[in-house]
Amino acid sequence: MHASILSLSNRMSYEVRSARTVNLAGSLLGVDGGMLLLERIENEAIETRRFSLLDGRVLFEENGIFSGYLTDKEVIIEALRFSTQSIDDTTLVSVVIEARVEVGEYVYNEDFYMSYTLRGSY
């Protein structure tokens, strides 16, 4: 489970730090089935990156096109919650992930908490 969440965290970190802004209208913040829509400028054009939860896995889209799942199928994501806080020109994105792995009769649950700052926001 930890390797899958670490890989997801690395990708989220890269995408959030590369973003110019969070598209609040296209995001679902503060709910278990959250969605985060990021915008960045690439070659003078606006590009988007979206993280969302689908069937217990974190899905990633680039410019509205499915790019793949960012978590292993063995790791069930129970909740993916995003929140943002802005102070002056700085935006912080916080993420809470509730994950579960089942091996036979054994069930392991763990919550993960991460925060990233948009570099394009300051």
Image (cartoon, rainbow, N blue to C red):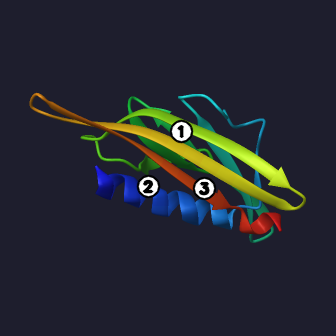
For disc 2, the marked residue is: 8
Quarter of the image with the C terminus in it:
bottom right
| Image mark for residue 109 | none
Judging by the rendered image, the residue that carries numbered circle 3 is 115
Q: Which residue is mark 1?
A: 52
Badge nearest the viewer, 1 or 2: 2
Query: Whole-percent x and y of residue 57?
Result: 39, 38
Q: Position of residue 93 (x, y in %)?
A: 67, 51
Question: In the image, 71: left or right of 51?
Answer: left
Q: In the displayed structure, would residue 43 be above or below residue 10?
A: below
Say which of 73 and 77 sits in front.
77
Q: Is residue 49 visible?
A: no
Residue 66: horizontal and vertical position, in percent? 50, 45
Residue sticking out furthest to the bottom: 43
Q: Earlier in the sequence, mark 3 or mark 2?
A: 2
Q: Secondary structure at mark 1?
A: strand
Residue at 43 percent of width and 55 percent of height: 8
Q: Tell me if mark 1 has few (under 14), some (14-19) or many (20+) residues whose alpha carbon lies within 10 angstroms of its own.
A: many
Q: Quadrant of residue 56?
A: top left
Indicate the position of residue 47 as horizontal and vertical percent values: 70, 57
Distance CA(mark 1)–CA(mark 2): 12 Å
The residue lying toward the viewer, choosing from 71 and 80, is 80
Q: Secondary structure at mark 2?
A: helix
* Residue 96 visible here: yes
Identify the amino acid type marked 3: Ser
N-term mark: 1 or 2 = 2
Q: What kind of residue is marked 2?
A: Leu
Three-letter code, disc 1: Ser
- Left or right: where 7 falls relative to 119: left
Relative to 28, say whether 119 is above or below: below
